[in-house]
Image (cartoon, rainbow, N blue to C red):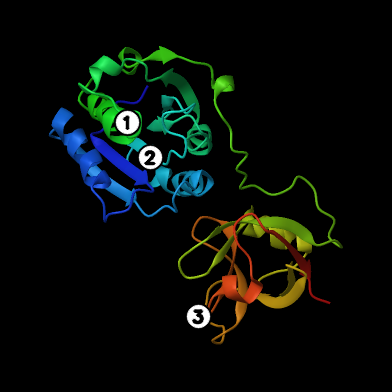
Amino acid sequence: MVKPCGVVAYLTDVGLMDPYAGSIKGMTLRFCVDAKIVDITHDIQSFDVAGASFILLLTYRYFPHGTVFVVVVVPGVGASERPILIVSKNYYFVGPDNGVLLSAAEDDGIEHVLSLSNVPHFNDKVTKTFHGRDIFAPAAAMLICGMPPESLGKPIPVSDLVRLGLKSGCPESWSGTEPVKLSVMHVDRYGNVILTGNFNQIIEALGITVGHKVIVHSKGVSTEAITAESFANTGKGTLILYENSYGLAELAVNQGSAKNVLGVRRGDPVAIARSR
């Protein structure tokens, strides 16, 4: 089990205009004044568990080993979403049992899962509506200050955890003559559309290389794009298919919005075919 390194990374949907993010971080420092707090983002769309899971999956590996990740995206807090701690090979994940932690934790390799049931260890008064402040933040602080994970709750099997079904890989088999069927995994603030597939696997399946044209089918519309390494050698307004910084296939428009061109949002199907 890796030793906590002192870093606590927060990923939430609470924003920065209200008292919630400050309260969470304040509670962390109350229990461990030496905590090194990092904000991944507090701008997850409200209640967007799948979106938060995706952001965590892409970002966790760039943090030092021993980082404690705290995710506060809890649409049903006070109901059935129990607070949990997942100990993986290199990290710790604290948050609700609603699937938000699982993709990243499994990607790193899960070693233990605990239900954070020892509430008296955390706060004098635990509310039913703010587990991020009253349970998750103190749990993270106690971990980095040396409290053994097993003292924070009872073990539970991985098979009992809620799953989202978030997938970032490619289908197992494709025919080179058929379109590659994918879906939209994420749309970023620039309108770039991240797909559920590895870029290199996609172009290999289509039998093409960078520079070839493809047809993107979405929402009943077919749009031509060009495979490219980056925006540098494409004209303004050009739709491109390229490998993003995480190895995934991404559709983007040079100085424009692929989201607007294609009219898609997360979860929508997208098919990519070789242009004839």
What residue is shown with label 2?
72
Determine whether label 1 and label 2 are within 8 Å by CB: yes
Q: Which residue is mark 3?
A: 232
In the shown orientation, is residue 68 left or right of residue 147?
A: right
Q: Which residue is under mark 1?
A: 136
* Mark 2: secondary structure: strand
- Give x and y (percent) for residue 53: 49, 43
Of circles 2 and 3, which is in front?
A: 2
The amino acid type, in three-letter code, at marker 3 is Ala
Question: Which mark is first along the chain, 2 or 1?
Answer: 2
Residue drawn at (52%, 35%), measured in percent from left and top? 99
- Residue 134 sits in which quadrant? top left
Judge left or right: residue 261 versus residue 142.
right
Mark 2 and mark 3 lie on one chain; the one further toward the N terminus is: 2
The location of residue 100, given as percent across then percent down, is 49, 38
Whole-percent x, y for residue 95 in the image: 40, 32
Q: Quadrant of the C terminus?
A: bottom right
Graded by Cα atoms within 10 Å as few (under 14), some (14 to 19) or many (20 or more), the crowding at tag 2 reads many
Q: Helix or strand or loop: what does disc 3 sit on?
A: loop
Q: Give the Cα distance between marks 1 and 2.
A: 8 Å
- Position of 202 relative to 26 (above/below): below
| Element under disc 1 | helix
Quarter holding the N terminus is top left
Q: Amino acid at mark 1?
A: Phe
Q: Of the residues shown, which amino acid type is indicated by label 2?
A: Val
Which callout, 3 or 1, points at the residue further toward the start of the chain?
Answer: 1
Q: Residue at x 43, y 31 (%)?
A: 96
Number of numbered discs visible in the structure rendering: 3
Splitting the image into 4 quarters, where does residue 63 fall? top left
Crowd band around label 1 with a 10 angstrom C-alpha radius: few (<14), some (14–19), many (20+):
many
Q: Residue at x 32, y 17 (%)?
A: 152
Judging depth in this view, the residue of 160 and 38 nearest the camera is 160
